[in-house]
Image (spheres, grey):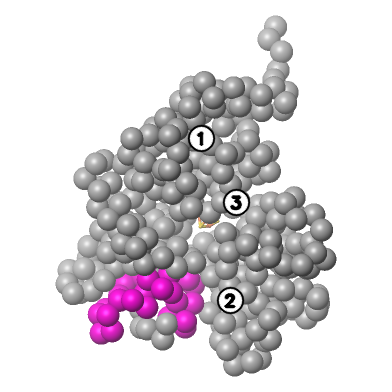
């Protein structure tokens, strides 16, 4: 009878396979702790793909969701990209299709399409620019005034960008069900209940633009709230003095990472049930199998890859 592998065995096997196969493991901030622990890089999706592209790895294992692995494949065409779970999709990315965008383009031939990185490779390929939650405001702000802009797929990030830039955008009605949980009343109640805490809010949150309006009007003190991507939240936590207390409005995986990395600071989830089931489909066993059997490859047809890369590179020139 074969002995069942322990967690330690799995970690040791993963480390061996990584070396043997010249692989690099990327883990998104929302992954479970034990998957993050075996990763070479932990971070947000675009940053991970950019870092992997700079390595001389032969294989990238992306512990994240499908569009993230596609982004890695777009930026590293010479590497084999694997995703441990084929079911790890993203309901936000799936909410807009190429056909939706092409229909809009037909009606607005001079229009500009800005797509959030949380989109499929096909959607990126029919977009003018990509953006992340940290540079969406900059990307939109540099588009010449008077051009119509379609912003896909996240409605709340779009409203936040409209608020920050004063630009009119046509918004796609997509949203992330995890960040939808962060309502204004929930955020305001917590700010009142924990007066020492600073609130870090992901711009995908339902309340992000209304809250930014209240901050602008002085109804909520500006030093109590910061809008940030997951990478921005990690930086804010790192720079804060010991003993700082934060309320975190994003998926709970990031809260766990912050608490592990900065044990002398306190991180409280705004909602303990803000869990992305797609992100939790990747397990340590899955990472091991992915490396061992080289499954599941994620590929992007070359013609789509080149056009998607163009939208990504145009964004990177602005960053
Ligand atoms: S947290 Fe939201 S946007 Fe991110 S993968 Fe999950 S469903 Fe998609």
Is residue 310 rendered magenta in the image?
Answer: no
Highlighted magenta segment, given as a residue range? 136-164
Give the SS element for disc 3: loop
Q: Which of 33/237 is in front?
A: 237
Mark 1 and mark 2 lie on one chain; the one further toward the N terminus is 1
Crowd band around label 3 with a 10 angstrom C-alpha radius: few (<14), some (14–19), many (20+): many
Residue under numbered circle 3: 29
Left/right placement of residue 185 relative to residue 72 reads right
Q: Mark 1 to mark 2: distance in Å?
A: 37 Å
Mark 1 and mark 3 lie on one chain; the one further toward the N terminus is 1
Give the SS element for disc 2: loop
Mark 2 and mark 3 lie on one chain; the one further toward the N terminus is 3
Instruction: Choose top left, top right, bottom left or bottom right for residue 57.
Output: top left
Examine the rendered structure and indicate whether residue 151 appears above or below residue 66.
below
Left/right placement of residue 72 relative to residue 41 reads left
Name the residue rendered at 72%, 59% in the picture: 272
Examine the rendered structure and indicate whether residue 157 appears above or below residue 304.
below
x, y percent for residue 196: 81, 76
Is residue 139 rendered magenta in the image?
Answer: yes
Q: Which of 177/111 is in front?
A: 111
Residue under numbered circle 1: 24
Left/right placement of residue 21 relative to residue 142 reads right
Instruction: Choose top left, top right, bottom left or bottom right for residue 234.
Output: bottom right
Q: Is residue 95 visible?
A: no
Number of the front mark, 1 or 2 = 1
Number of the front mark, 1 or 3 = 1
Residue under numbered circle 2: 207
Q: Which of 102/308 is in front?
A: 308
């Amino acid at each position: 009878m074969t002995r069942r592998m322990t967690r330690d065995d799995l970690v040791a096997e993963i480390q061996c396979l990584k070396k043997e196969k010249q692989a690099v493991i990327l883990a998104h901030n929302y992954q479970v702790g034990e998957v993050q622990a075996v990763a070479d890089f932990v971070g947000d999706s675009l940053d991970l793909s950019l870092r992997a592209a700079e390595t001389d790895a032969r294989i990238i294992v992306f512990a994240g969701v499908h569009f993230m692995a596609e982004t890695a494949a777009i930026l590293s065409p010479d590497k084999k990209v694997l995703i441990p779970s084929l079911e790890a999709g993203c309901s936000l990315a799936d909410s807009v299709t190429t056909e939706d965008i092409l229909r809009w383009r037909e009606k607005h031939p001079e229009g500009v399409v800005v797509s959030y990185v949380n989109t499929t490779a096909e959607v990126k390929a029919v977009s003018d620019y990509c953006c992340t939650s940290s540079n969406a405001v900059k990307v939109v702000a540099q588009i010449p005034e008077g051009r119509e802009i379609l912003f896909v797929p996240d409605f709340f990030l779009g409203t936040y960008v409209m608020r920050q830039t004063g630009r009119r955008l046509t918004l796609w009605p997509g949203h992330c069900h995890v960040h939808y949980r962060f309502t204004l009343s929930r955020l305001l109640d917590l700010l009142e209940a924990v007066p020492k805490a600073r609130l870090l809010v992901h711009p995908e949150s339902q309340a992000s633009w209304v809250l930014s309006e209240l901050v602008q009007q002085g109804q909520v003190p500006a030093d109590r709230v910061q809008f940030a991507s997951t990478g921005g939240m990690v930086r804010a936590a790192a720079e804060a003095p010991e003993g700082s207390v934060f309320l975190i409005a994003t998926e709970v995986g990031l809260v766990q990472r912050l608490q592990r990395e900065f044990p002398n600071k306190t991180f409280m989830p705004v909602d303990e049930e803000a869990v992305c089931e797609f992100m939790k489909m990747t397990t340590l066993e899955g990472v091991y199998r992915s490396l061992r059997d080289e499954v599941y490859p994620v590929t992007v047809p070359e013609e789509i890859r080149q056009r998607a890369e163009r939208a990504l590179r145009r964004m990177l020139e602005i960053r």
